[in-house]
Structures are given as structure tokens and as C-alpha cells.
Image (cartoon, grey):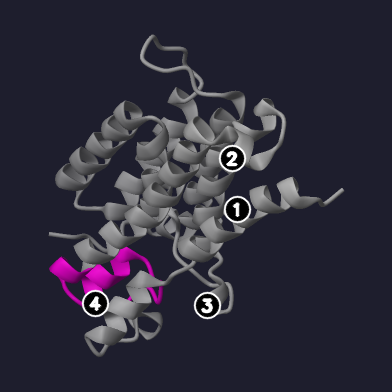
Amino acid sequence: MFDSFSCKFFLFILAGYLIGGIPFGYLIGKMRGVDVRTVGSKNIGATNVYRTVGHKWGFLAFFCDFLKGLLPTIAALVMVGQHPAFFEMPDQIVMELPVAVGLACVIGHTLTPYMKFKGGKGVATAFGMLVAQIPWLALIAFALFVVTVWLSHYISLGSILASAFLAVVIWIPTPLAAPTLSLRIVMSLLGIFVIYKHRSNIGRLVKGCENKIY
């Protein structure tokens, strides 16, 4: 049954997908006269922007992709916390909205409808989703990413290790937070998905020919 209240729920998820799909990396590259789909790794993510367009533009792309996961998830959390009756649905279903919206943002980034469903690897957008849900865990994962990149000069290795860390640690009970089962499942799946998206990077890391960053 697809009635008015389920339509509201679906529209929030669709909005997350469409916002997540905004190809900021591509747009920033075009603004600087570079089509990132034709240079470097040919990926529209922040790392390729960093390498092919410039450092500050790469950081800008990362920040924009981060906001795509953060802001829609926060909006969903606010709606669930302050206006749950808006959806006219059972509470146990309404409480899943932030996770569903955050996941939709990541899917939108990796399968953007504006670029023939070809997008980035989802690291920054998934990070934004996690910051909205469990900030302290996101901070630890980010610290692991930064330290790994600083020591190894491999952005891909930092992304892979941080994703693997989140996929495992999200299941460990802590007094700081009690993630819902759906959030644990989604973050684990996203961690595995991000690692899968880096499979070519893993191959180059094993061979010792992955691009370093300085």
C-alpha cells in the first residue's frame, strides 16, 4: 500500500538520493577547465580532483561530498525527533528514516543520476552520514584515515583501513552510543562496499604501483 504517509517517507529518501547524486567533483573540475572523468583515475571523487585539479579544490570537493551525507541525515534526524507524527507511521519505522536517507545519499554519490549512474567511491558522503549519527566514532575513523595517509602517503589505504575499522567497530557495544541494528548493518555494508570500490587500488597497492600523495 503506497498511501500518503509512505509517500512522505519515500520522498525523504528520494531527496537524499538526489542530493547525494550532485557531482561536486565533476562540477569543481569543470569550473577549473578540467573534466575529471578524462584524467587521472577518471573518477569524480575528491581524490582525483585533488590530484588533477589542485589540492585546495580536492579539499573543497571532499567537503561538499561530506555535506551531502551530513545535512540530509541531520534533517531526517530532526524530523524524526521533533515531528514524528508528520509521517503517520509506526514509531519503529519512522526511526529508521535517518539511516535510510543517509544510505540513499551514499548510493546517490556512487550511482549519480546526473552522470549516467557513474559516481565516486562514497567515502566522504558515508563519513558525513556517520558524523550525523555517531560523531565520536566518525572522529576515530577520521583520525585513523589521517594517520594512515600521513605515514603511507596513500589516500586509498587510509580509506580502506577506515572503512574496515567502521565495519567491525560498529558492532562493539560501548557506553557512548547504542547504534540501532539497521545502522550497524548499513555501516558494515557501506564499509565493505567502499573496500570493494577500491579493489583496483588494492591491486596497485599489492604491486607497489599505487599513486602516492605528498
Residue 48 part of the magenta segment: yes
Circle 1 sits on which residue? 13
201 is higher (above) or lower (below) than 177 = below
Circle 3 sits on which residue? 114
Q: State the extent of the magenta-drawn residues as a range.
A: 40-57
Residue 212 part of the magenta segment: no
User: Can residue 210 be seen at all in this image of the molecule?
Assistant: no
C-alpha distance separating marks 4 and 3 = 21 Å
Of callouts 1 and 2, the N-terminal one: 1
Of callouts 1 and 3, the N-terminal one: 1
Q: Which-is-in-front pick, marks 3 and 2?
A: 2
Q: Which amino acid, by three-letter code, is at mark 2?
A: Leu
Q: Residues within 10 Å of mark 2 (few under 14, many from 20)?
A: many
Q: Which-is-in-front pick, marks 1 and 3?
A: 1
Q: Position of residue 17 (x, y in %)?
A: 55, 60
Pointer 1 and pointer 2: residues touching (CB < 8 Å)? yes
Looking at the picture, tell me which residue is in the foreground, 212 or 6. Answer: 6
